[in-house]
Amino acid sequence: MNKDFDYDVIVVGGGHAGTEAAAASAKLGSKTLLITMNINMIGQLSCNPAIGGVAKGQLVREIDALGGIMGMVADSSGIQFRMLNRSKGPAMWSPRSQNDRAVYAIHVREQLERIPNLYFRQDTVNKIVAKNGCVHSVRTTSGQTYKARSIVLTNGTFLNGTIHIGEKSYGGGRSGEKAATGITESLHAYGFLSGRLKTGTPPRLDGRSIQYDKLEIQPGDENPHPFSFLTKQLPGQNEQLSCWIAYTSPKVHDLLRLGFDRSPMFNGRIKSTGPRYCPSIEDKINRFKDRDRHQLFLEPEGRNTYEMYLNGFSTSLPEDTQISALKSIPGFEHVHLIRPGYAIEYDYFPPHQIYRTLETKLIKGLFFAGQINGTTGYEEAAAQGLMAGINAHQHTIDKTKVVLNRSQAYIGVLIDDLVNKGTEEPYRMFTSRAEHRILLRQDNADYRLTELGYQIGLIDEDRYLKFKKKEKETDELSKAISSYSARPSSFNEFLSLKDQAPLKQSVKIPKLISRPHIELEELIAIDPELKETTRSITSDKEVIEQINILIKYSGYIEKEQELVKQIDLNESKAIPKSIDYNRIQSLSSEGKQKLIKIKPETIGQASRISGVSASDIAVLLIYIKS
């Protein structure tokens, strides 16, 4: 074979999973080829022009802490930034950015083109070739064959994709782009099972035709928080663009119902399952008949365009129904439709067919990442892409693959859920899925993961030294304020303003911070001596915020850490690869069936499989010991 067509890693697909996978494997030293159908569509925000949100923001912070690119690109292309759930505890705080769609894609491309080991090819892969149980090469519609030791499939919604708008259906992977055919069929030949899922997108509107005085304004944060730990400056509130809130009404719902008989969702043309937590507008009014209105978010697509995205109005209804319903929403009476909403069905491969490394069980060196595993969302895709890229590289050099556990990262929760529980609907990350979420906060992603990123090779020396400096300052500041006494004369006036009980005697600073609504930053501003003490250690706001959280939630954090230690005992107990579950007589029928299907690597993983009981785990432990 021509050496020009010989690579260490091939990544198929240029979306969020594909770009993270390609960047990771190339940065780590693998000669990497990114094959995509249209090189000008790399890094597209296919649906809403936003990054992050509840739990998704935590994923982006983790991607950045490990050395991925999504956080930096989100910061550099952001046009509005908000920290969601600030009224709740820090485990729930989730960063979100509204992004300039065009700038985001440009910046992704720029990030990739800076990596020396990364090459691009515009082509369409239509066949995966394996030999002797190992991946060998891909073939394309142009007739070329590209060989690699590791191949990562990140096909998004393109595998046999079908777009639906009312009674019209046609092949497509995204609006204006054709579907990818051949890959599903070639994987079936190796014994893989596939299914069909659905997702949708709202109409795009001409912002000049909106009456904004009838909508509620939603500005960005005054002091915005970045995604990347490398970003030091974001646009202030006055430099950010506003979003807007609108509402449907009973009249809007009645008009939408008029199109139900031509809806592919209700007339049977769409048979696959859509995302439960992001339903279409027709699904919402059908399922929640008692609701007389639903909230909609009007979001700008960029700084230099008047195109707007109507979040909450995802639909596949006929275009005439979409227009008549939209024009009945206050503020949208004269709306001009740029692009109608549509639904798309596509192939995915149920994720019981992969290990937690994202390598497939049937073919060594073949990795799946993103919507091919049944997930939905840019952030879930990017997180998988990063881990698949890391492990594809590890496979090429015969090194131990990297697995994040559930107490280490939301990324670990995501992948563990997919492998152990599977999914029959598009999987979306929520904070409620993470049992250790008090440990997996967005603020401490670097403390949890940057050391690992450095050990792997994705974090460079300069960034690592900056992180170690921050870590040292956190430790030193914690010790300094723990020995600093707060005097009544210095703080009682402040406490009175906060409706707090006055100090009768001096107490250590952590005792004050543990009170509700009292922050270290406020105490520093009051006491000149404390200000000098802390300033000699650090002026980093992230360090000060970290101290606040560690003190206020110390009891919860300590309990959670103890629980994790207990769970880790089972997590470290490996299950032999050669184990024959059919020979273990005392296993329940369902437990045996699930263990054979999933092939868990540890007792901890086995214990999280739906259908595997506590008694099954006890039997398994005795069998392994004997």
Image (cartoon, helix red, strand yellow):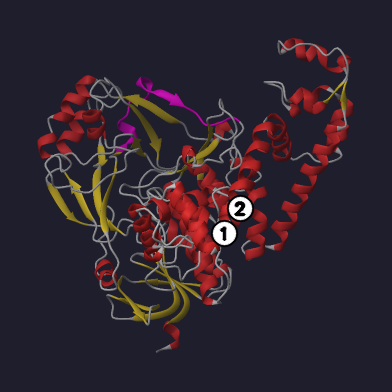
Magenta region: which residues? 205-222
Q: Is residue 23 visible?
A: no
Image coords of residue 182 (percent x, y): 25, 70
Q: Nearer the viewer, residue 139 or 202?
A: 139
Mark 2 residue type: Leu
Left or right: residue 65 versus residue 348 is right
Q: Is residue 27 visible?
A: yes
Image coords of residue 522 (percent x, y): 75, 24
Tell me the number on the disc at residue 5. none
Q: Which residue is mark 2?
A: 569
Q: Is residue 219 magenta?
A: yes
Toward which corner of the image does residue 350 lie, by quadrant? bottom left
Mark 1, residues whose alpha carbon is within 10 Å: few (<14), some, or many (≥20)? Answer: some
In the picture, the quarter occupied by the N terminus is: bottom left
Mark 1 residue type: Lys
Image coords of residue 612 (percent x, y): 41, 50
Residue located 68% across and 37% down the image: 558
Toward which corner of the image does residue 66 lie, by quadrant? bottom right
Q: How far apart are labels 1 and 2 at the CA level?
A: 7 Å
Do the numbered discs 1 and 2 sit on residues whose CB atoms are within 8 Å?
Answer: yes
Instruction: Identify whether 39 is placed above or below 531.
Output: below
Q: Nearer the viewer, residue 233 or 171?
A: 171
Q: Which residue is mark 1?
A: 573
Toward which corner of the image does residue 440 lie, by quadrant? top right
Mark 2, residues whose alpha carbon is within 10 Å: few (<14), some, or many (≥20)? Answer: few
Left or right: residue 559 versus residue 592 is right
Q: Element type at marker 1?
A: loop
Image coords of residue 499 (percent x, y): 71, 10
Q: Is residue 451 magenta?
A: no
